[in-house]
Image: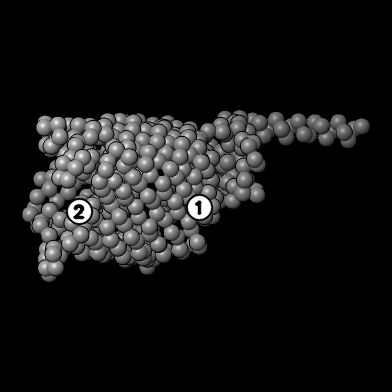
Amino acid sequence: MKKTLVSALTTALVVGAASTTFAAANPFTDVPADHWAYDAVSQLAADGVIEGYGDSTFKGNRNITRYEMAQMVAKAMAKNTSGVDKALVDKLAAEFAEELNNLGVRVANLERNADKVKWNGVAEYTFTEARVNNHGAKFTAKDADHDKNNVLFRLEPSAEVNNHWHVNARLDANSNLKTDEGDNGKVSLERVWAQGDYGKFQVKLGKFASMNDDSIADTAFSGAEASFGKDVKLILGAGRLSMDDVAYHYATAWDSVAGVHHSDATANYQYAGLETNKGKLSAGAYWHHLNADGFYKKHVAADVYRMTDEANIWMLKAGYKFSKNVALNGFYAQDASSDIYKKAGSIELDYKGAEQENKGTWGAWAAYRHLGTNAIVKSTYDAIDTNFKGWELGANYTLFKNVVTTFRYGNEKSLVDSNLKAQTYFGRVQFFF
């Protein structure tokens, strides 16, 4: 009986002492389910930096405490990570600094708000030469508009507003080395948007990259986007797009049927997508809708066309990873509102890939692309032009850490004139910082 009483008193004293020691940090408070730290730790676990909660999980759907989170962060700090992973670890260490200090992990040099604003960027040089063969003639240089000798300096700041919201931007400065023309030394604000992340729900507001910017819609538009889900994601977006950023349009074209000119500076733009990315397979179905005067053609009769005021582009996309090094991906798109040049598609086989952080890494690919201009909002491809079809071969290589070179060769034939063929040589070197 006496032993039981002594034991109880001892336990009470220990608990009391512990509560006094950790009262300021309140280490046993649950981290909310929608806190950004869960995604950060999940990413570190996927990269092999952190082991999660003992068995690499968060114990099902149970929230973990700030003290448990700090234990995982302490293990990650001990691994001396670099690059993106280090940035995540530093941010977690700043968030859970009090708990880490209580564990004996010194974070005196980390300020919780020190990384509110992060800057990333790239300086790149691009060279492109395109040569054409028309009606059996020798391949000769295309006009100057198709060749590039360009330098780009890009900054991409990201500022933390709170645990859920960030503000992001992109600033570009271009210069054509052949003519010393470009932006005349001016820096242009290409994108700026606020982004809110709430677990599986994300919202973007402002000017940002549209859905499918890796294939048929490589442009920024002004509007809003919301997405929900993880393994299966629903994406909805709406806004306005400059007609200058559309692959093919007739801003001042003559409608041979209606007998009038059409012109619109901007187009209404909406899109929707449903995609999944789980394991080795990724797939998606998408819809892009644009509305503006003089947008696309409908074929009425020989050499007679009517301008339509909208585009309805449907797209299917899929990819499969056969192994760590080999992957196959492709898409098919069609504009339901056009009669000509209404189909676009691509299939690409990839082997490895240059890793920005790792000197000596490399990759190569072979692709066949058919890029009907009316099925594309704006193409992202450098070696095959819109309204052309053909083969592309490419490779990239990391010369030094954060220095990546890329080479592409395209052999293409016009969809408008089958006698018109072209070869494109593309080279780029990028310095990331």
Residue hosting label 2? 416
Considering every residue shown, the one lying at the far right of the view is: 1
Q: Residue at x 34, y 61 (%)?
A: 367
**Is residue 19 or residue 349 the one in the foreground?**
349
Name the residue rendered at 23%, 32% in the picture. Answer: 309
Q: Which badge, 1 or 2, is on the more N-terminal residue?
A: 1
Q: Is any atom of residue 101 visible in this view?
A: no
> Is residue 142 or residue 415 the one in the foreground?
415
Could you tell me which quadrant the N terminus lies in? top right
State left or right for residue 230 relative to residue 422: right
Instruction: Give the residue number, with chain letter if any, for mark 1.
Output: 281
Position of residue 427 measured from the top left corner of the image (x, y, whole percent): 23, 62
Closest to the observer: 324 or 157? Answer: 324
Mark 1 vs mark 2: give the one in front.
2
Q: Looking at the image, is 329 positioned above or below residue 261?
A: below
Dot 2 amino acid type: Val
Coordinates of residue 131 in the picture (x, y in percent): 15, 64
Q: Residue at x 13, y 37 (%)?
A: 256
Q: Are marks 1 and 2 in contact (CB under 8 Å)?
A: no
Sort mark 1 into few (<14), some (14-19) or many (20+) by Cα contacts within 10 Å.
some
Q: Secondary structure at mark 1?
A: strand
Name the residue type under label 1: Leu
Q: Secondary structure at mark 2?
A: loop
Dividing the picture into quadrants, the one containing residue 129 is bottom left
Question: Residue 55: where, in percent of width, then height?
Answer: 65, 49
Q: Is residue 70 left or right of residue 254?
A: right
Structural crowding at the residue carrying mark 2, measured as other residues with C-alpha within 10 Å and reported as few (<14), some (14–19) or many (≥20): few
Tell me the quarter of the picture where residue 260 sits: top left
Which of 397 and 160 lies nearest the eye of the viewer?
397
Residue 62 position in % (x across, y down): 64, 36
Which residue does the image show at 28% across and 61% down from the upper left? 390
Q: CA distance from mark 1 to mark 2?
A: 35 Å
